[in-house]
Amino acid sequence: MALAVTSSSSTTISGSNFSCLSPSSELKAPQIGSFRLLDRSHGSCASICLSQRRSLVKPINAEPKRKDSVVPLAATIVAPEAAEKDEVEDYAQLARDLENASPLEIMDKALEKFGNDIAIAFSGAEDVALIEYARLTGRPFRVFSLDTGRLNPETYKLFDTVEKQYGIHIEYMFPDAVEVQALVRSKGLFSFYEDGHQECCRVRKVRPLRRALKGLRAWITGQRKDQSPGTRSEIPIVQVDPVFEGLDGGVGSLVKWNPVANVDGRDIWNFLRAMNVPVNSLHAQGYISIGCEPCTRPVLPGQHEREGRWWWEDAKAKECGLHKGNIKQEDTAQLNGNGNGSATVADIFNTQSVVKLSRTGIENLARLENRKEPWIVVLYAPWCRFCQAMEGSYIELAEKLEGSGVKVGKFQADGEQKEFAKRELELGSFPTILFFPKHSSRSIKFPSENRDVDSLMAFVNALR
């Protein structure tokens, strides 16, 4: 018994190279991607139909010798082949044309333009909104996800729920087992806490993504401008991918769509609730940005959502490499806190109540065993958005402590000072707040990330 794929225009394609379905009654829904079984008596006609219509459906795996690029066609909703690629496409102009378009309009444009050569990247978080937008267009669509092997159980449950609700099969990409084995055997399961997350993400996420994208001409992401202040504030609606290559290979062979780039996170959640879209149950536990289990945690009220990711690292390092193209060249050295971004960023915590300490000043303060008065000092970087966010609270704290006998200081610990600060001052990420007691040489680190003035004052009062 042969298998046919029926489109909304009643075109029939048959052939033995499709996966067989178990005998069942005919599916009568007249939509692209619906299947019906043909009797063997139609075999000769089926062969003719296949040869005539072969160009309408092609394998998703664009590299026949590969078995690990984006998965075979049988695991997806079948989509029509994209129209012939435009000779020249000005995506910068297209991004400007779509700047005020709705996510639904942008999604429809992307699916219309690239057909079966485009897929939605789904992380298991609020980017499930992309799948709902794709459904609302009425067009066929594909979804892929990176299974790093270290996701939360709740994320895997969401994958299963989404597949069932939308009638799709997510195309999972996995890291290379040999690479993972080598990493874990040489550095352990939690090396990223010691030397940064980039190496682990490169093995478990970036390389599998690279393989997946080699089978596509475009991909759709859930990036928003408000997600990561240091790296995503200028993402366009659509762009030529600056990092990865697509099906045709080479620079410019892959297009990246960001339909919700201009949407506020609160509006995304209003949309999810209004449309009754399934969401990750971790969101109800305080998680906003969700990644791998060891590298994700809930955030406190008032914290930015990306503070729940790789919290032991600097604020500007909140990218795993999947969207490395967001990082401007001049920010690359600054990404890990090694650059001196203050050359173009105004200093912060500027008030007479806050003493600016030099390298010599902070060294002397740290070495004193009998200080005349206790100190509270923030280790900061002017470019750090989280440092900027606490500026008001810290200045208010300084004003409240004026005349109380407690000195309030600041030390710029990025650039050339970062290694010293990490080695001598317990710098983990920016900002780090230290209290230097009056009769002890040992500093005490503020343990909370809730940096409002009341929390900071409680910390000081408990120790002075």
Image (cartoon, rainbow, N blue to C red):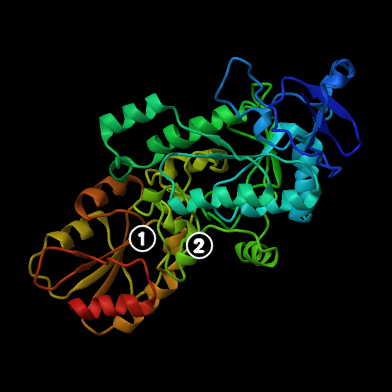
Q: Which residue is drawn at 48% across and 55% down?
A: 345
Q: Where is residue 272 in the image (x, y as percent from the top left)?
A: 65, 62
Query: Between disc 2 and disc 1, whose residue precedes?
Result: 2
Q: What residue type is labelled 1?
A: Pro
- Kindly check if marks 2 and 1 are in contact, taking CB atoms under 8 A apart as contact: no
Residue at image mark 1: 431
Task: Residue 232: tell me if it is visible.
Answer: no
Q: Residue at x 32, y 26 (%)?
A: 182
Position of the N terminus by quadrant: top right
- Camera-near label (2 vs 1) is 2
Compared across the picture, whether 35 is left or right of 215 comes to: right
Position of the C terminus by quadrant: bottom left
Residue at image mark 2: 283
Closer to the camera, 407 or 166? 166
**How crowded is the residue under tag 1: few (<14 C-alpha within 10 Å), some, or many (20+)?**
many
216 lies above or below 352: above
**How crowded is the residue under tag 2: few (<14 C-alpha within 10 Å), some, or many (20+)?**
some
Q: Where is residue 354 in the image (x, y as percent from the top left)?
A: 33, 71
139 lies above or below 411: above
Q: What residue type is labelled 2?
A: His
Q: Where is residue 236 in the image (x, y as percent from the top left)?
A: 68, 47
Element at label 2: helix
Closer to the camera, 399 or 200? 200
How many angstroms separate mark 2 from mark 1 (CA)? Answer: 25 Å
